[in-house]
Image (cartoon, helix red, strand yellow):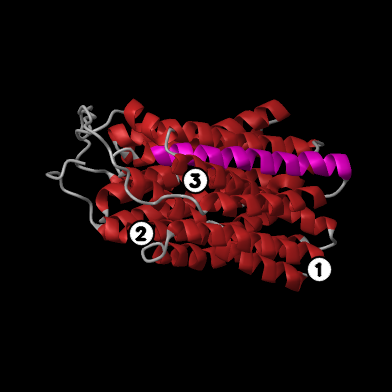
Amino acid sequence: MDTSSQKLSIQQVLICGAAIVTLSMGIRHGFGLWLQPITQTQGWTRETFAFAIAIQNLSWGVFGIFAGMLADRFGAFRVLLVGAVLYALGLAGMALASTPLLFTLSAGILIGAAQAGTTYAVVYGVIGRNIPPERRTWAMGVAAAAGSFGQFLMVPTENFLIGSLGWQNALLVLGLAVLLIAPLAMGLRESAFGAGGSAPVREQSIAQALKEAMRYPSFQLLMAGYFVCGFQVVFIGVHMPSYLKDKGLGPEVAGYALALIGLFNVFGTYIAGALGQRLAKRKILAFIYLARVVVIGVFISLPITPLSVYIFSSLMGLLWLSTVPVTNAVVAQIFGVQHLSMLGGFVFFSHQVGSFLGVWLGGLLYDRSGSYDIVWYLTMALGVIAALLNLPIKETTIVRGPITAAA
């Protein structure tokens, strides 16, 4: 970034960025609450709903790459505005869709694109450009914690809206609420990106930065590990309410469970961000993945009761999005912040491919076998693999030769 340009204050970046992530992530964390109301009303299978949400995650990953490029080139403000509008349209379409195709286009494509422009990759780019390296991982942890607080705040709210207004009206209300992202985006408007859309001078072009990252083994390992993260958390987030209902528990247990995940993830992401300033980030990531394996294994091996669900949700919450600030901080530490949103978008794309498979296979294998057991075991096996993949990552700044300046 051009050092002559005035940076945003740390407080402004964190308050506005955290509020945006709270709203955007908070709404999407509650989508599992709509699985049964929508499928029962429309006469669709769980696979139909799960496939649309799987497409949402894949769409988020694909559009996240381009949202990151645009945010690095033109600033986060414009990307956030477009994302807010798409989010509102997607929620309205989700409420009014009468066929699986329309539902997939709205809940899947539109909302996925909206999330790409209103969540971590875009917000973390602003953090990376405006907050000093010695506080960057901590700041990313704060933003991730905000997303977790959004889950704690919004999931019970969404449950209440569904119960009091009906699932369709609840989605329309959320569509209006998500437009609050637009005024919040004003607080992330950076002076370096002028009215004419000119970006600061960069040492690398997009192609050079991407080529460098894709050839770097540690970047590849980071992407592979993040794939597993997406598989695990989205499977649990979307299918947990239905899994608990199959076990004879009421919908309020699922609502409390998702809220507890969000509440404890506030602490988990903040702690991970703070620890990332002092400990090797690859070891933090390996620990998180292995801890998930243990927590899941104990949960599914014991009788499912409200108490066991709440304990599982609290422990899983500590591990839920704690990978996010650490993973993005590793990218910034290795490659710098000039193309952080774009590179973060590529890493997140891998996460979303895992999310696609986790949520879709959850629905598919349930419909085929009548149980979620196979997917639970798969999440555990993948967790062990992810832990092993993260350990060899080199976190040191990459050494570059002479680079021709590029805009």
* Residue to which mark 3 is pinned: 222
Distance CA(mark 1)–CA(mark 2): 38 Å
Q: Which circle's residue, 2 or 3, is located before the other in the chain?
A: 2
Q: Secondary structure at mark 3?
A: helix
Instruction: Find disc 1 in the rendering and name its residue.
Output: 302
- Image quarter where the N terminus lies is top left
x and y, in percent, of residue 139 in the image: 35, 59
**Which residue is painted at 80% across and 48% down in the image?**
374
Callout 1 touching callout 3 (CB < 8 Å): no
Kind of residue sitting beneath label 2: Ala
Three-letter amino acid code at the position of disc 3: Leu
Q: Quadrant of residue 58?
A: top right
Q: Secondary structure at mark 2?
A: helix
Residue at image coords 64%, 60%: 292
Residue 174, image x, y percentages: 55, 47
| Residue 377 horizontal side relative to residue 324, left or right | right
Residue 308, x across and y down, in percent? 74, 70
Tell me, for residue 139, which label it has, or none: 2
Q: Residues within 10 Å of mark 2 (few under 14, many from 20)?
A: many
Q: Is residue 357 magenta?
A: yes
Q: Position of residue 31 (x, y in %)?
A: 64, 47
User: What's the residue type where badge 1 is placed?
Assistant: Leu
Q: Magenta segment range?
A: 343-369
Q: CA distance from mark 1 to mark 3?
A: 33 Å
- Residue 105 appears in which quarter of the rendering? top right
